[in-house]
Amino acid sequence: MSTFGNEPFDVIVVGSGPGGATVARDLSRRGKKVLILEWGPGGPIRGNLVQYVKELMVPGKSLLITNGMLGLVRGITTGGSSLFYYGTCFPVPLEMFAACGVDLAADVEEIRRELPIARLKDEMFTPMAGRLMDSARHLGFDWQRLEKFMYQERWKPEFRFGYYGDPNDVKWSARMHVDDAVAHGAVLTNGAKVTRVIVENGTATGVECTMKGEKHTVSAPIVVVSAGGIGSPMIMRNSGIKEAGYDFFFDPLITVCGTIKDVALRNNEIPMSAGVLMKDEGYIMTDMAIPPSNHMVFTAQVLRLDKLFAFRHTARIMVKAKDVQSGRLTDRGGVRKKLTGTDLDKLFHGYANARRILREAGATDIYKTWYLAAHPGGTVKIGQLLDANLQSQYRNLYVCDCSVVPEAWGLPPVLTVAALGKRLARHLAGRQF
Ligand SMILES: Cc1cc2nc3c(=O)[nH]c(=O)nc-3n(C[C@H](O)[C@H](O)[C@H](O)COP(=O)(O)OP(=O)(O)OC[C@H]3O[C@@H](n4cnc5c(N)ncnc54)[C@H](O)[C@@H]3O)c2cc1C
C-alpha cells in the first residue's frame, strides 16, 4: 500500500484551514474520494502553550517577520490558523466578489445554518468588555457585540477561551470540518508539505510533496491548493505561475492598553466580544483579551516593563486597518511588505480613538503595542490569476483560501473563506472527472 492508500482519489486538497477543510468536507459528503495533504500535525487539541508555540510560533515556518519588523503568524496544523483564531465572524464582502462574477450569498446562508454563529450571550460577556462598550457608546461610537463562531451552549464559566486551541470544542475551528470529511471517507495525511503541482500539457495531474525528508508524488484529476495566503502562492510559483505572491494585504494591527484599577480581567475573557467598524476611516476597533504570556511579550517589546505584571487590570483595544495592497513574497516565502503612510495614518487615527475610549473607561498609563499582521491574503487573486470558478491557467488546478480574495477589505475572513470553499465544492461536484 502507498503512503496515501491504494484507492484512486478524485480530488487532492492541499492544506486544511477554513478554505481546504470546507472543500474537503463538502466534497466528501457528496461521495467524492478526497485526499487532504496537510503540512502540520494532527493529534489531539491540548490547548496548551506548548502546542501553541509548536504550531503557531516557529520562526521561519509559522511565525514570519516581515522586512518592516511586523510579526505575522499562521497555524501550521490540521485546521490551519482557525485552531488559534479568535472565532469572530464578519460579514462577507458580497459586492467585492460579485464584481468578479462570484455570487456567495447562498453559500453564506448555508454556512449560517450549519455553523454556530451568534453574538455572545450575556453570561459570556465580561465586565471588562462591558466597560469598554459603555465607554465607546458614551463617546458616540456604534460599538456592538460581534458575532462569534462558538457553540455557546457548550460553554461553562470555568472554560478559558481557546487561544491555544480549544479542547472543550466551544470555539468552532476548521478541524471539525476535517474530522467530518474523514468520517465521510476522506484520507488525511499529516506531515506532507506540498512543494508543487504536477502539470502535464497544461492540466494538473497531481502534486509533489515531502514527508520526513522524502519526496513523494500523488495523482488525482483535480487539485485544490488551500495552503493559505502565504503557502498557496509559494506552491503556485513553484508550479510555474510566477506572478503569484505580489501586491497583497495583511491587515496590520496594534493594541492599545490602559490600566483600569476597579475592573479585573476574568480567566474566561473572550477576545473581540464587541467593537465597531469605522468603514470610512478604514479600520476596526474591538475589545481584545489575550493570554498572560502574550501580554508579557507585547509589553516587553515596547519596553513598558512597568506594566509587565499588570495583566489583570489591563484593558485592551485592538485597532486593525485595511492596508494598501503592496509587497512581494520571496521565493523562499519571506514577506517583503512595509506599512505605507496611508496604513500608518489609519492605525494612528484608531490609536487616538482607542485612547479616548480607554480614558473614558477610567484607564490610566495608556500605551500601544508593536505592529502585527493578521490575515495575509490576495496573493493569488480572482480576476488576475484565477477565473470566477477559482480555476488557474492550468486546467483542474484550483485555489481556495484567503489568497484568492481580490482586494483588501481589512476584516477577519473565515466566513468568506469558508463560503468560497462551499461554492467550489458545489462547482466541482457538478463537474465530470
Ligand atoms: C491569532 C489569530 C486570530 C485570528 N482571529 C480571527 C477571527 O477572529 N476571525 C476570523 O475570521 N479570522 C481570524 N483569523 C484569521 C483566520 O484564522 C485566517 O484568515 C484563516 O484561517 C485563513 O484560512 P485559509 O484556509 O486561507 O488558511 P489557513 O488557515 O492558513 O490554512 C492553511 C493550511 O495549509 C497548510 N499548509 C501551508 N502550506 C502547506 C504546504 N506547502 N503543504 C501542505 N499544507 C500546507 C497549513 O498548515 C494550514 O493548515 C485569525 C488569525 C490568527 C492567527
Image: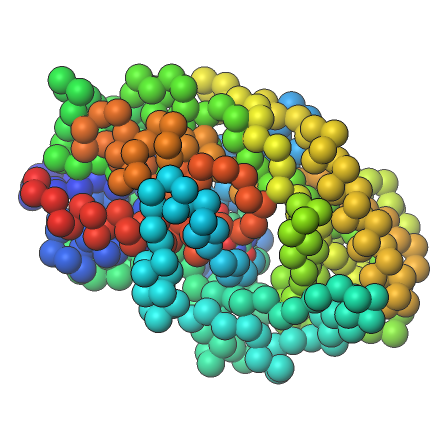
Task: Give the residue displayed 45% in from the left and 37% down from the top.
Answer: 406
Relative height, residue 222 to residue 172 (above, below): above
Instruction: Identify the image quadrant of the N terminus.
Output: top left
Task: Give the residue displayed 65% in from the left and 23% down from the top.
Answer: 67
Image color mode: rainbow
Residue 382 placement (x, y as % from top left)? 37, 35
**Does residue 264 appear to the left or right of 226 in the view shown?**
right
Task: Report which quarter residue 164 is drawn in.
Answer: bottom right
Relative height, residue 48 to residue 206 (above, below): below
Residue 58 placement (x, y as % from top left)? 54, 37
Residue 395 placement (x, y as % from top left)? 18, 28
**Does residue 392 appear to the left or right of 381 in the view shown?**
left
Residue nearer the viewer, 196 or 376: 376
Whether residue 102 is visible, yes or no, is yes
Relative height, residue 330 to residue 406 (above, below): above
Whether residue 3 is visible, yes or no, is no
**Does residue 108 appear to the left or right of 349 in the view shown?**
left
Task: Give the residue displayed 88% in from the left and 66% down from the top.
Answer: 360
Task: Give the residue displayed 36% in from the left and 65% down from the top.
Answer: 109
Task: Report which quarter residue 191 is drawn in.
Answer: top left
